[in-house]
Image (cartoon, grey):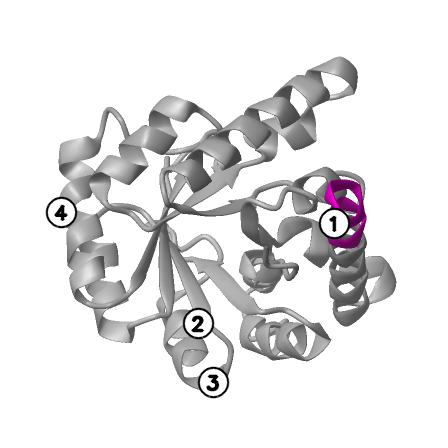
Amino acid sequence: MNDYLRLGVNIDHVATIRNARGGLHPDPVRAAVLAAQAGADGITAHLREDRRHISDHDIARLSKEIDIPLNLEMAATDEMLDIALQHQPHATCIVPEKRQEVTTEGGLDVHGLHNQLMYYVGALKNAHIRVSLFIDPDKKQVEAAARLGSPVIEIHTGSYCDAVGAERERELQKIIEAAQYGEELGLEVHAGHGLSYETVKPIAALWEVKELNIGHFLVGEAIFTGFAASIRQMRTLMNEARRASKIETA
């Protein structure tokens, strides 16, 4: 049982603030360096088709200027595949993308898009880039990801984070079952989307989950406490949940 839970910090919304009025500030690459110093184990950045936050130049700089793993979130398109093959990030996470959405609204339909995704998963694996598929906590999607040969899944936690009361508990149970099933099938399980100080501990306590990717909340909290402080606090909560879970299962 591996005690340590990795934290990937998503810097997309540092770029969102920069792009609100143009120019160079705040610099998402500076945020990535600061995140690494504050305890992040990796940096996540989503290069969208419409370039609404992270830019091609950001990806080029991140590839050269950070010394922790870069996880490139990308749609399954030829353009994004070419960019991934050019920059050779440590990892890619294939996500669904709709131009009209404000943020990612759910997971990939891996089951329905099997034939389309096969090409992109295969090309990335052949380039020795770790592949993850961003999916809803649905056993059918977990199984489809395993059939595709993706070594990693990232479970969408947005519905869990948005829910309240008994509904949140039901959404958490879906995540638990999907994570357990993923591990049974030999997949490395990650999780992310919408996680906050309030919602992170039950997810961090799941031993099947090896990595969390968190961004929007940390950037927002940075307004009040500073970016490094927000990351350190998230890291502390993750560690506390992991320790408590270990004691419970001992």
Category of crowding for the residue at label 2, using alpha-carbon neighbours closer than 10 angstroms: few (below 14), some (14–19), many (at least 20): some
x and y percentages locating residue 150 in the rendered image? 29, 47
x and y percentages locating residue 149 in the rendered image? 23, 45
Q: Secondary structure at mark 1?
A: helix
| Amino acid type indicated by mark 2 | Asp
Residue pictured at 59% horizontal, 65% vertical: 18
Question: Foreground: 199 or 220?
Answer: 199
Of label 2 and label 1, which has the lower sequence position? 2
| Amino acid type indicated by mark 4 | Tyr
Are circles 2 and 4 on residues that touch, CB within 8 Å?
A: no
Query: Does the rendering let one see residue 124?
Result: yes
Magenta residues (range): 242-250
The residue carrying mark 4 is 119
Of label 3 and label 2, which has the lower sequence position? 2
Q: Secondary structure at mark 2?
A: helix
Q: Quadrant of residue 117 in the image?
A: top left
Residue pictured at 15% horizontal, 57% vertical: 123
Of label 3 and label 1, which has the lower sequence position? 3
| Amino acid type indicated by mark 1 | Lys
Question: Foreground: 182 or 26?
Answer: 182
Which dot marks residue 246?
A: 1
Left-right relation of 76 to 34:
left
Numbered disc total: 4
Are circles 3 and 2 on residues that touch, CB within 8 Å?
A: no
The residue carrying mark 2 is 58
Residue pictured at 62% horizontal, 23% vertical: 173
The residue carrying mark 3 is 65
| Amino acid type indicated by mark 3 | Glu
Which dot marks residue 199?
A: none
